[in-house]
Every structure is written in C-alpha cells, then in structure tokens.
Amino acid sequence: MAKAVITIEGFVARDPETRNVTGHTITQVTVPVTPQKKNRDGAYEDSGDTIWYQAEFWDEHGDRIASDIRKGMLVTLTGGLEVKTWATADKSGVNVNVTFPTIGVIVRKPKRDGSNGGSNATTEEPWATTAPANSGAAQGYSDETPF
C-alpha cells in the first residue's frame, strides 16, 4: 500500500470556522504558504503564488481545535493531499485540502532580547505554558536541561 503525506508549516490565516452538518461539528483551519527563495542580498523574497491549505476536524477533535487554535499561531499541519479544480464562466481555481489531518502548535523560544522570534505568540495565549511561581522552576522557557 502506498501513502502520500504532506506537512505544511505556517501561520493560521484566520480563527477556525465551525459549522454543524447532520449532527456533526466540523471545524476548518486554513494555513497559507507562499514559496520563498533567497535573493542576491541573502534576504528571502516571495517566489510564487500563495497556496491556501484547508483542513477539517470533526466532532470532539474540531471542538478542541476551535478552542485551542487562533489566527496567527504557527502550526504544522500533516495529512493526505486532495486537490480539486473548479471553474465558473468567468474564473477558475484550485482547492487544496489536507485529508485526515493532524495539527500541532509550534511554540518558538523567545529571543534573549525579549522578542518572540517573529511569531505572534505571547505567553498570554491559552496554549503557552509557564511553570507556577511557587514551583521553584523558572517562569517561561529555559535553556537548562529539565532532568
């Protein structure tokens, strides 16, 4: 049996959208990716059209995604790939769906200058974790080995 799997890393385009269909909750997440390359100056620049990947999560998985994922979060989205073309009288396009998806939030380690490495994440986000103040552990992230 052959199986093709794709992994996308990018920022969530908008808050997850939830709808109900025949008694099931379906939550959709959209992650756009624009190809980039280095220019002569060594800086990255866009080198192609943005591809908008969509993934649907059902029932309790969708409920969890709707409560934990927000616009601007850096995520990794993995699953099968389904590409459908469409056309109307005046335009055409392609829908790219990730099937049987899994999603994970990527939490970047803050830079020493206090910035967060380019992501929109802050410690105020519901998925960010810190050690309790009375635990003796450092608040936030640490370079120390945890054991």
Image: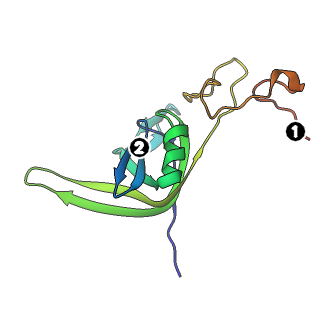
Q: What amino acid type is highlighted by mark number 1?
A: Pro
Residue depicted at x 50% and y 57%: 101
Q: Secondary structure at mark 1?
A: loop
Q: Is residue 111 above or below residue 7?
A: above
| Horizontal and vertical percent position of residue 5 | 51, 64
Q: Quadrant of residue 21?
A: bottom left
Q: Is residue 91 above or below residue 136?
A: below
Tell me if mark 2 has few (under 14), some (14-19) or many (20+) residues whose alpha carbon lies within 10 angstroms of its own.
Answer: some
| Horizontal and vertical percent position of residue 61 | 53, 52
Horizontal side of 46 relative to 132 (left or right) equals left
Residue extending furthest toward the left: 89
Residue depicted at x 36% and y 47%: 19
Tell me if mark 1 has few (under 14), some (14-19) or many (20+) residues whose alpha carbon lies within 10 angstroms of its own.
Answer: few
Nearer mark to the viewer, of 2 and 1: 1
Residue extending furthest toward the front: 23
Q: What amino acid type is highlighted by mark number 2?
A: Pro
| Horizontal and vertical percent position of residue 94 | 27, 55
Residue extending furthest toward the bottom: 1
Residue 23 is tagged as none
The residue closer to the viewer here, 46 or 14, is 14
Residue 146 is tagged as 1
Mark 2 = which residue?
Answer: 32
The residue closer to the viewer here, 17 or 96, is 17
| Horizontal and vertical percent position of residue 111 | 69, 24
Q: Earlier in the sequence, mark 2 or mark 1?
A: 2
Horizontal side of 22 relative to 67 (left or right) equals left
Q: CA distance from mark 2 to mark 1?
A: 35 Å
Q: Is residue 7 visible?
A: no
Residue depicted at x 36% and y 44%: 50
Quadrant, the C terminus:
top right
